[in-house]
Every structure is written in structure tokens, then in C-alpha cells.
Amino acid sequence: MTVPELLESKNMTLYKLSKNSGIPYTTVNDIYHGRTSLDKCSAETVYKLSKELGLSMEELLEPYLRERIGFELYKSSVCHRLKELGDINFIIETLQKDDIGKFFKRKWYPESLYLLAMLDYVSRENNVPLCTKYEALRSVKLKDTIYPAGVLTTALVNSNDNAKRDASAESIPEFLRHNIVESEVRNVI
């Protein structure tokens, strides 16, 4: 459901949503009226709205995902979901929803492979056997390596690739297998 539909179903006013979530009224009002697209909001705004509306970030963004959201916001959303659910519940929910397969069918390869890497990483951390359903995808690599935005910015400012090399060296192996550089998935605000 969209934000207007959610507010109606919960019999909640814009003012109450703004006050309880800590998001400025003008921002909530702009999202409600479509002047600001939810998928263009910061991860913090999406997180606060989803908490107040009793949904995961993915559930809140779903109606807006007919078009892809930015990859950085997607990554943040997955990390927040892991933090909220805990490792085992994250594994269970991810397998039940099968977003890995859904995204891959849509040809949203970075999202699909990021989620698979997260699933495999959390499984390894908890000594949970890997789901064999995704065995064929484990050998898929993105054509171009995806670096975190901060790493790309540092490389650009310094006019060299040292930041990229360092980030790759520190990357979690499950992500690097797919040409995704990711070293921090648990330290989210």
C-alpha cells in the first residue's frame, strides 16, 4: 500500500505520522501528495516511516519499486532489515519471500546478488547450511564491480584507486564473489 492508503487504513493523520516518526510535517506532506517520491528519500526517512507504520522498509517501498530505487538505498534497506529481524529471522524471511529469484527474473542483478550475498554471509556467520535453491546464482558475477558510494567519492577526490583497492581487500567474501564490494553490513543507524 502507498503512504496515503496506509494512513487511511490506520486512521492516522499526517500530523500524527510526522509527530510520532520525527519527520518534518512538510516532508510527510510532500510524500503523501506525491511531490516527493518515497524512493528518493533518505534511508533514515524511509526507516522512520516504516517503523511508525509498522512495516519493513521493503514493504513500505514495494509500491514504489515498480521503478528501481537507488542501489545505496536498497543496500541500506537490507542492512536495516537484518538489524531489525536478527540473523535467523532474516534468513527465514529472505528464503520465504524469494526476492533473490524475483529480482533476478526482473534482471535486477545487483539487488538479487546483494541479497544472496547477505543471505550467504549471515548463514556462514550462524553455521546455517546454504540454501541449495540458489546454487546456480552463486557463480554469477556482475560485469562491473560495484563499490560503496563513499569509496567512489574518496577515489575521485584523491585521483587514485587506493580506496577501491583497500575496500576490495576488506570486503566480505560472499559479496566480493559477485563483484560487490561490501565490508560493513551490521553498523547501520
Image: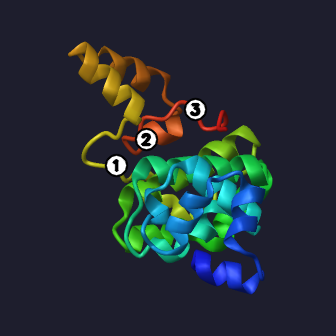
In this rendering, is residue 51 above or below 29?
A: above
| Rendered location of residue 8, percent (x, y) | 70, 85
Q: Mark 1 sits on what residue?
A: 141
Q: What amino acid is found at the position of numbered circle 1 in the picture?
A: Lys
Distance of mark 1 from mark 3, alpha carbons?
20 Å
Residue 108 located left or right of residue 182: left
Q: Nearer the viewer, mark 2 or mark 3?
A: 3
Residue 83 located left or right of residue 43: right
Q: Mark 2 sits on what residue?
A: 177
Secondary structure at numbered mark 2: loop
Q: Mark 3 sits on what residue?
A: 184
Which residue is depicted at the point 55% across and 59% down? 26
Secondary structure at numbered mark 3: loop
Which residue is depicted at the point 26% across and 13% down? 158
Distance of mark 2 from mark 1, alpha carbons?
7 Å
Q: Residues within 10 Å of mark 3 (few under 14, many from 20)?
A: few
Q: What amino acid is found at the position of numbered circle 3 in the picture?
A: Glu
Q: Which residue ends up furthest to the left in the rendered image?
A: 159
